[in-house]
Image (cartoon, helix red, strand yellow):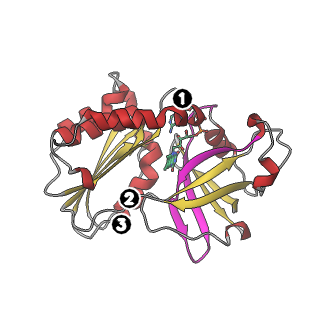
Amino acid sequence: MYGTVLTTERLTPELVRVVLGGEGLADFVPCADTDAYVNAFFVPEGAPYGVPFTDDEIRDLPREQRPFPRRYTVRRWAAETRQLTIDFVVHGDVGMAGRWAQHAQPGDYLQVRGPGGGYAPHDDADSYLLVGDESALPAIAACAEAVPAGRPVLVVVEVGSAAGELTLDSPGDLQVHWVHRDAHDGDPDRLLAETLRTLPRPVGLVSAFVHGEAASVRAVRRHLLVEGIVERDHLSASPYWRRGRTDEEWRTVKSAWQREVEKDVPTGP
Ligand SMILES: Cc1cc2nc3c(=O)[nH]c(=O)nc-3n(C[C@H](O)[C@H](O)[C@H](O)COP(=O)(O)OP(=O)(O)OC[C@H]3O[C@@H](n4cnc5c(N)ncnc54)[C@H](O)[C@@H]3O)c2cc1C
């Protein structure tokens, strides 16, 4: 499956919105989870194939010529027009995906597979807590739009500066707390967790979604479980990326990292 870039839009200094469409998305079947994601494939410069490519075309190529897979959230799927919206973090002149988004033009192609997903706001929750950085903002925004009407939703998002803020919509009773990296010089891994300590505790049975940079997610997860703010079965927490590592490097150590994270807050005897 592949999409043709229809439009691109700079939402904030860190986020570029790309809307994909075209007949290459004819087989796209959406998924109900609010964190639905696709595997997108970024073709290195000079590779001897283009989009769309088949598995047979790339199987025997050297690693550096094969496409680089990256996961991206389905910010929106418009069923009527069959258009897929993805919001990409652009993080300097590094990263296959970030650079692709930074330079994407109408008419470019992006091959995708999926979607898959893992979280939807729990129906039985009294309130919702959605935490992350810009990489999780598409899923957080989709989740805020999908919560039951009137229930409290606390969103805590880390962005580079005030210019990184977006308007979020929700049928819930929405409170958004933006955390600006440029206003803090402490440990970046602890910024979100420390911020949560200063905010009112969410009420009742909480459904929580915590995603973004790995060490930051780990610190938030530990805080929420140790303080008994969220029950494990109502917590979705996973590391989308790791500071200082490419996705390839991160994937080689991610399982071991997640096993270590599990030990942070032991389950009962
Ligand atoms: C299920 C899932 C859904 C995701 N959804 C989104 C999404 O909707 N939008 C989105 O932008 N990302 C999303 N991500 C994260 C994205 O896949 C990673 O950030 C990915 O590493 C970006 O690839 P890249 O090629 O740009 O950079 P890489 O080649 O992987 O990394 C190059 C350098 O950039 C750094 N880097 C990577 N990501 C970031 C970042 N976000 N901010 C600052 N530095 C970074 C790395 O640490 C490394 O030093 C999602 C990840 C998962 C697992």
Residue type marked 1: Arg
In the image, is the residue at mark 2 within 8 Å of ligand 1 by its beta carbon?
A: no
Circle 1 — which element? Answer: loop
Q: Position of residue 151 (x, y in %)?
A: 21, 64
Residue at image coords 77%, 58%: 52
Residue extent of the magenta highlight: 66-94
Q: Using a 10 Å C-alpha cutoff, classify the residue at mark 3 as few (fewer than 14 neighbours), some (14 to 19) or many (20 or more).
A: some
Q: Earlier in the sequence, mark 3 or mark 2?
A: 2
Give the Cα distance between marks 3 and 1.
33 Å
User: Label 3, label 2: how many angstroms apart (C-alpha)?
Assistant: 11 Å
Q: Which percent across, then down, holds residue 48?
A: 86, 44
**Which residue is at 71% across, 68% downward?**
22
Q: Earlier in the sequence, mark 1 or mark 2?
A: 2
Q: Is residue 191 magenta?
A: no
Q: Residue furthest bottom?
A: 80
Q: Which residue is mark 3?
A: 146
| Quadrant assignment for the N terminus | bottom right
Q: Is residue 73 magenta?
A: yes
Is residue 109 depicted above or below 31 in this figure? above
Q: Amino acid at mark 3?
A: Ala
Could you tell me which residue is drawn at 61 percent across and 40 percent down? 98
Taking 71 as reference, is 52 above or below it? below
Horizontal side, residue 207 vs residue 14: left or right: left
**Mark 1 = which residue?**
245
